[in-house]
Amino acid sequence: MMMSLFLPLLLVSVLFMNSFSEVRGRKWKGEGTTQNLESIAIGRCYDYIRIVNPAVGEKNCSEIWEAFKSAFINKDPCSILPEDYELFINLSLHTIPANKSLFWENNQLLVNSFADRGRRYMSVGDTLFGFFGDFLNWCGQANSSGLDYESCPTTMECETNAVDSFWRMASITYAKHSSGEIHVLLNGSAVGGAYPQPSFFADYEIPNLQKDKISQVVIWVVDDIEGPDLDSCGIHSVKTLETRLKTLGYNVTCTDNYKSVVFLLCLDYPDNSKCALPSF
Amino acid sequence: MPFQQSSTRARQRTVLLVGIVLLLAALVLAVVLASLLTHGKHEDSPKMLKWKDRGTTKNLQEVILGRCYNYITERYPELGDKDCLKIWESLKDAFIYKNPCNITAEDYQPLMDLASHHIPCNKSLFWSKTNDLVHRYTKSNQNFLTLEDTLLGYMADKISWCGDPSAPGINYESCPKRSECESNPSSVFWKMASKMFAEAACGVVQVMLNGSIEAGAFRSSSIFGSIEVFNLNPDKVSEVHIWLMHDIGGPQSESCSGHSIQRLKNILEERNFKIICEDNYRPVQLLQCVHNPDHTDCRLCTNSTAVP
């Protein structure tokens, strides 16, 4: 009987030790660097300048990759600042056409669809610098020239990590180079408010808008088709946003459930009463 | 006399110097002329064939590799076993250094074998003359896959390539149009990929056709009409759903009861497929309304704001 207990006990303790050592092996709580990051990023850069938006002209994508890497390679992954991406931004910057900027919070996939890869609007993810890093993850390590594919710090572990600082820099740059009529798409069903604070929009984009280049700020607050109507124009967090922008001196308009966006949301709920079209 | 001797020497030296200078000048002139001529030759590239369509996309390798890795990393991690470098090499080998009017299916077979993957049933979405709309739809609704949403199509979409027998083997200046020769790298690729896409389909398949074009929604000369329809496997595919879309505010040249749709139905029924046709499939029409929100066809019935 002792023998029959011994083997299962041994197995369990070996498994426990394995999983324990695995946990100890991971430095950080977040996912590691995306596999094949270099090929993906350089490929995206060329894809952008050759196919997506050839209007930006010739760019040296290898140089851009090196500048990107230099922001976080061989450094403590919790010590990366937005300014570390300055060279990367300088090399990948291009004009953002007037009236095409689309800011957003809590609706990334919707914005991707609505912007239509820069044809209708150009969100930050439709610029070369944003396209470069969208949906990817990365970090380096101190005293090593390699990327960490095992784990990367989450925002909770440290705010000054490679990815968050990248998007801060990208947001600052995007706001600085936006002009004409700018648009903001907010989620009226988001818990915590359609205009969240803190957020990229509140802390890095609004403060970097160039007032003399912007003719109007158009706010759209759209509820999820099956979601609650928690926030709308003129109330709660949206009112806070409108007041802030008006105080800063911007012309502001706000629309609830802008039809074009509602139609897009309706794709997944064609039979919902909100999506009923006249019968033909 | 010594003065006379030195002046003779000086004259000799002068002559020598002038001779050397003239020689150097001639040499420089020869080098300049030679480089101009060869430079001119490079620019003309008289050996590379000239065609009417745009040339190979620059940085083709980087774009293809990046798209391949992006696809398997971001979109379909289940395809983690795909070797993107091998896939790129097999694409390159299909056309490099070859006359771009002599491309065959065999040239692409290794690529097709490496890059093809399983397509879940009921998700295949074919299309004809609805390129823009169908891809905006699959981008917003991941329930359906067009050929351009599979690895092969994703890599090749909006890209062009062709080879040439002379170095460097890839023609970046121009590539043959279909009218110049049918067996060009692009046409052969898309025909093969379309055939395989149709063969891989199972369950219920969908096709988005354009009911606003005069030439008819279903054309036998299209890739759908000439290749895909005939490569659907009746043992795997149970039904074909036709979505016949009209442009918002556009002409209703054809509907589900139209002639070309009837022809399509006949072809499919002969091959034992069940057919359902729907005019203006609702979810896709909603997508069209994104661009025409104020059109009368896009009035939302529950719209509480006043209609102008």
Image (tube, rainbow, N blue to C red):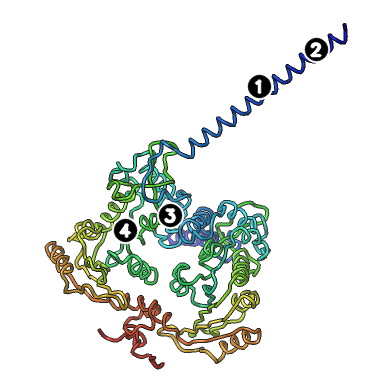
Q: Amino acid at mark 4?
A: His
Label 4 – label 3 distance at C-alpha: 16 Å
Sequence-first disc among 4 and 2: 2
Residue B118 circle label: 4
Label 1 – label 3 distance at C-alpha: 59 Å
Label 1 – label 4 distance at C-alpha: 73 Å
Left or right of residue B281: residue B77: right
Residue under label 1:
B23
1 vs 4, front mark:
1
Residue under label 3:
B68
Label 1 – label 2 distance at C-alpha: 21 Å
The answer to whether the residue labelled 1 contacts the one labelled 3, judged by CB atoms less than 8 Å apart, is: no
Residue B221 place in picture, x, y as percent? 22, 58
Residue B96 place in picture, x, y as percent? 39, 41
Residue A61 in the image: above or below residue B34: below
Quadrant of the snapshot with the C terminus of chain A = bottom left
Residue B9 circle label: 2
Residue A270 place in picture, x, y as percent? 33, 81
> Element type at marker 4?
loop
Residue B157 place in picture, x, y as percent? 38, 57
Q: Amino acid at mark 3?
A: Cys
Quadrant of the snapshot with the N terminus of chain A = bottom left
Sequence-first disc among 3 and 2: 2
Q: Chain of mark 2?
A: B
> Dot 3 surroundings within 10 Å: few (below 14), some, or many (20 or more)?
many
